[in-house]
Amino acid sequence: MQNDKEIYLSSKNQNPEVEKKSTNVQGKPVIILVLVLVILFSFAGASGAWFLYRLYESLPTHTQLHYIQQPLVSKVFARDGSLLHEFSTERRYWVSLDEVPLELQQAVLAIEDRKYYDHWGIDIHRIFGAIVGNIVHKRYAQGASTLTQQLARNLYLTSETTMLRKVREALTAIQLEQRFTKEEILELYLNQVYLGAGVYGVQAASEQYFSKDVSEINLNEAATLAGIIQLPERFRPDREANLERVTRRRNTVLSSMVVTGAIDGQTAAQAIEQPIVANPRERPTPLGSYFVEMVRRYVAGRYGDDALFNGGLKIHTTLDPVAQDSTEKAVTARIEVLQARLNRKFLDSTRVYREMGISRDEFLADFDSIYAANSEQLASFPDSLRLRRAQASVVSLDVTTGQILTLVGGRDFQESRFNRAIQARRQPGSAFKPFVFTAAFDEGYNPASVLLDQPITLETPEGEWRPENYDRTFRGPITLREAMASSVNLVAIQLFNSIGAHRVIEYARRMGLKHTMNPVPSLAIGACEVTPMEITSAYSIYANAGVQAEPYFVTKILDNNNRVLEENAANTTEVITPETAYLMSNLMQTVVCCGTGAAIRREGFTRPASGKTGTTNRYSDAWFVGFTPQIVTGVWAGIDERRSMGRGVTGGHAAIPIWVSTMSALHRDLPVTNFQRPQGVKSETICNESHLIATNNCPETSQEVLLSTQELDTCALHTNVRQRRDGSMIDLLGPPRRSREKDRDRSFMF
């Protein structure tokens, strides 16, 4: 009997084709399987490699790891170093680790990462513990992120809870540990972490919740801050609703500190007995909004928005906060007075109160509320109140340096961001006259020169023009000093025509007026446009011996490492001679003592001061620009729509009260000084009747200032001997140096 092996061999030998076919059938699945496995493993390997490559690409670059830029608050400081404003997207102030109390460092590590100094970015034991805990609780019960992982997530990643993000977080944490020391990572974390109320970092949080520097906080406060990290808005201590849970969280932190050995049980127990007393930081009252907006535009223009809002810049400015506060209060008070007049004018012109069935007095007593409730109906009037909103602007400069000390651009920055102090072009009215007189003095006139104040008719391209004085009176022969004090239009126009329009324009341009000035006689009384900043800066020349200091408002800018980015100082230019500047400042002192600016003395400002009022046609602009030897301030009041503010609203009425409040505050710590007479100016005793050098027989005399090179005749009205200092008698009604009769005849007719 054949055994199985023989039968198998026999059959194999007898049918070799069958054997071959069977072998092929059995081998194909194996090959296919191998091929499939190879393909799958290759695909998996490629996918894994691609995943790892993409993961690597998504990790922070070397540069990003090395240069970590956290958004920091930029601070704007006033002249005295007080905080004026902050610019930020995230309110954060950088502090070094040395400035953070050890108790706060220990509190954060005790509650957030007890093994911080033992791990290398991730804590394997903590990860497995978190996994087990979450499985037991069947929910996300605890996290496993180390402090370094939290920092990595906050710096480079989002808060999405995906496996990919967790992997990236872990890898980034390892990178951070390789790049930085433990102390550096802890410093980064303490300055980066969000602590509620829109604040980031322990310094901002300490200021926000306890109104103190982080270096000054105690154990109780340190534990409270550390407890906020887990749920910032729920654990912020400045909300009464949070107090109970905040206290429990604080106690948990203290207990954790006992476990880590940072404090002992007795110390913790004493701290637990203490209440949590939040002392929320009071934000400074917004001050100088128009000024701050100027700072914003300047810094953003030079360094970019990112540097301004995130760069932690320290911007030192020229603003005097005490004077600014006084100025803003004065503007508010005066605008209320002006607005009340405009309200009455509106009611008297429309009689709308009759249509509404209420009395005029009732409407006036509650004007704003009644107008607001009926705004649609009242706005239909062509002269509605929306066209009658009183406005004002103020700018004050240090005459020596050009520093802007106060600035108000309007009644309400939130209502209108148009900065009238630097952007509004308004007619200066009689405030332009000093430029005419300045040019005249350099042409040989002096304060005692006499012109006739009488009716004149001027030929213009539009026809005859018969200018008038404000009071519609004529004074006859009058000195330039008297004409300036009383703001006599007809004398200014004659003087303008005498020296020539282009000469006046040349001086105005030289002194900083930039806008169109047509060479017509009406320019003498302010028929042009200026900004308050321009004309105020121009007047500073008189106070500063002929030298103009370019206005500026940023003194220094530091970066977040206290490196100086820029530092500004006075930029000065001599514009007119010291002698001419003194003659003008002395001339305009008469305006203040006994002219159109006399309200200054009645308002209580007694320092030596000079200046000029200005009021335009129909009382649409009211000015006072005045100065002491130290400071110049220009005040404008009016309506944006260039409408009348009402008869009698002059520079003296509308502008001087604001000027006095501003200048009084600005001079609070300054010594009283007088204008210093230069060597090229002399003082002479003048006869008040002839306006020539007085004799012992002249009944009334006064002191007058002249250039040392100017010589006047001796008064011939009160002496028996007609004395002359030179070879010719100067015509009382003419210029002191040369005849301009030809020019006069060509310019106007009597």
Image (cartoon, rainbow, N blue to C red):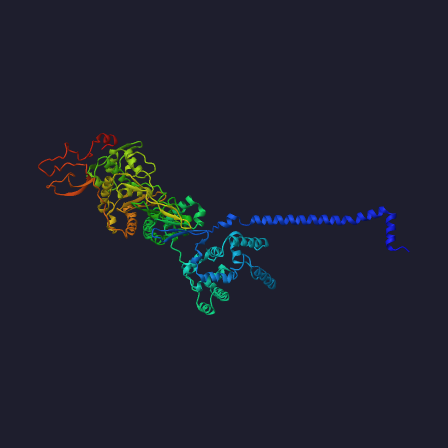
The one of 507 and 158 positioned closer to us in this rendering = 158
Q: Is residue 687 visible?
A: no
**Residue 152 placed where, x, y %?**
52, 54
The residue most toward the left is: 720
Task: Identify the residue at image location x=87%, y=53%.
Answer: 6
Q: Is residue 306 visible?
A: yes
Quadrant, the C terminus:
top left
Task: Identify the residue at image location x=11%, y=39%.
Answer: 718
Residue 513 lies in quadrant: top left
Is 242 positioned to the left or the right of 614 in the image?
right
The one of 555 and 685 positioned closer to us in this rendering = 555
The one of 265 and 354 positioned closer to us in this rendering = 265
The one of 580 and 32 positioned closer to us in this rendering = 32
Is 715 positioned to the left or the right of 337 in the image?
left
**Residue 29 placed where, x, y %?**
76, 49
Quadrant, the N terminus:
bottom right
**Residue 96 placed where, x, y %?**
44, 55
Is 624 positioned to the left or the right of 240 in the image?
left
**Residue 654 placed where, x, y %?**
30, 47
Count of marks, rendered view:
0
Residue 136, compared with residue 654, is above or below; it is below
